[in-house]
Image (cartoon, rainbow, N blue to C red):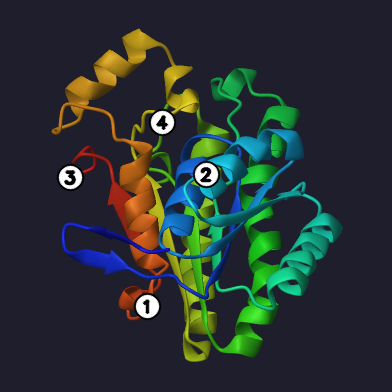
Amino acid sequence: MTEQQDGFQVDLSDKVALVTGASQGLGQAMAVRLAAAGAKVACIARNQDKLQETVAAVTDAGGTAEAFACDVTDGASVDKVVEAVVDKWQRLDVLINNAGVTRDTLVPRMSDEDWDTVLDTNLRGAFLMTRAATRPMMQQRYGRIINISSVSGLMGNPGQANYSASKAGLIGLTRTVARELAKRKITVNAVAPGFIETDMARALGETILDEAKKRIPARRLGQPDEVADLVAFLASDAAGYITGATITIDGGMTC
């Protein structure tokens, strides 16, 4: 199944994609979009029960998806799930490192646990997934790795030292791995969303979101589908000469 929008067709037929943090928000939107373009999608999160909503959204639309429970901070669990995906579909073409958490507070009040939890999930998890996924991709001599960073990793955000550090680290990881894998026809890019209308953003409260909109030239929050469309393009053959890039999608906030 492929989907055409505004005359440009993203075709991921015969491709296998793995999306972490796929149980809600951006992860769910990206899983559904990749499946709409024809990919078979492995939906990854800690809670397999919550993933069933994403799988149902994909299958109801005629796509193919399966839920896999995995803690992205655990190397053995990551290796096991990547092996299971390859065993099921005989390949792995696209990795979306999207799993992420927040533990917001100012630095003087930030605990060791708050720091470690965010860095372990957002950065270590992406490293572990990338390391595991590159093995089949290198054998295929083809792959697309897309790391979901944030404008917080570019400009910082008070109360988010841990989150901003993890997202900035993803950009550094992206650039280095892109250089390492380019000769194998594996591209590695980062997407840096701004304020996107998800549960994570809504948790900030209406007052903060209203203030945020005033700082965004587009005067609105982004939609998960808009990020998903960008990710689908980067996952496609049409983006084969784009690697090591960090693409912001923020309504002009970081202009």
Of the numbered discs in the image, which one, if any, rests on residue 157?
Answer: 4
Q: Is residue 32 visible?
A: yes
> Does dot 2 land on a helix, a strand or a loop?
helix
Residue 35 vs 61, above or below: the answer is: below
- Report, in whole angstroms, how far the alpha carbon at label 4 lies from the one at label 1: 35 Å
| Viewer-nearest of discs 4 and 1 | 1
Which three-letter amino acid code belongs to the residue tagged 2?
A: Asp
> Does dot 3 land on a helix, a strand or a loop?
loop
- 93 vs 191, left or right, is right
* Location of residue 218 in the rendering, given as x and y in whole percent from the top left corner: 15, 33
Q: Quadrant of residue 241 in the image?
A: bottom left
* Location of residue 38 in the rendering, given as x and y in whole percent from the top left corner: 46, 65
* Mark found first going from the N terminus, 2 or 1: 2
Of the numbered discs in the image, which one, if any, rests on residue 255?
Answer: 3
* Mark found first going from the N terminus, 1 or 3: 1
Residue at 73% from the left image edge and 30% from the top image edge: 112
Are discs 2 and 1 less than 8 Å apart at CB?
A: no
Which three-letter amino acid code belongs to the residue tagged 1?
A: Asp
> Does dot 4 land on a helix, a strand or a loop?
loop
- Report, in whole angstroms, how far the alpha carbon at label 3 lies from the one at label 4: 16 Å
* Mark found first going from the N terminus, 3 or 2: 2
Q: Is residue 47 visible?
A: no
Are discs 3 and 2 less than 8 Å apart at CB?
A: no
Are discs 1 and 3 less than 8 Å apart at CB?
A: no
- Report, in whole angstroms, how far the alpha carbon at label 2 lies from the one at label 1: 26 Å
| Viewer-nearest of discs 2 and 1 | 2
Q: Quadrant of the C terminus?
A: top left
- Report, in whole angstroms, how far the alpha carbon at label 2 lies from the one at label 4: 39 Å
- The residue lying furthest to the top in this view is 207
Front one among 129 and 109: 129
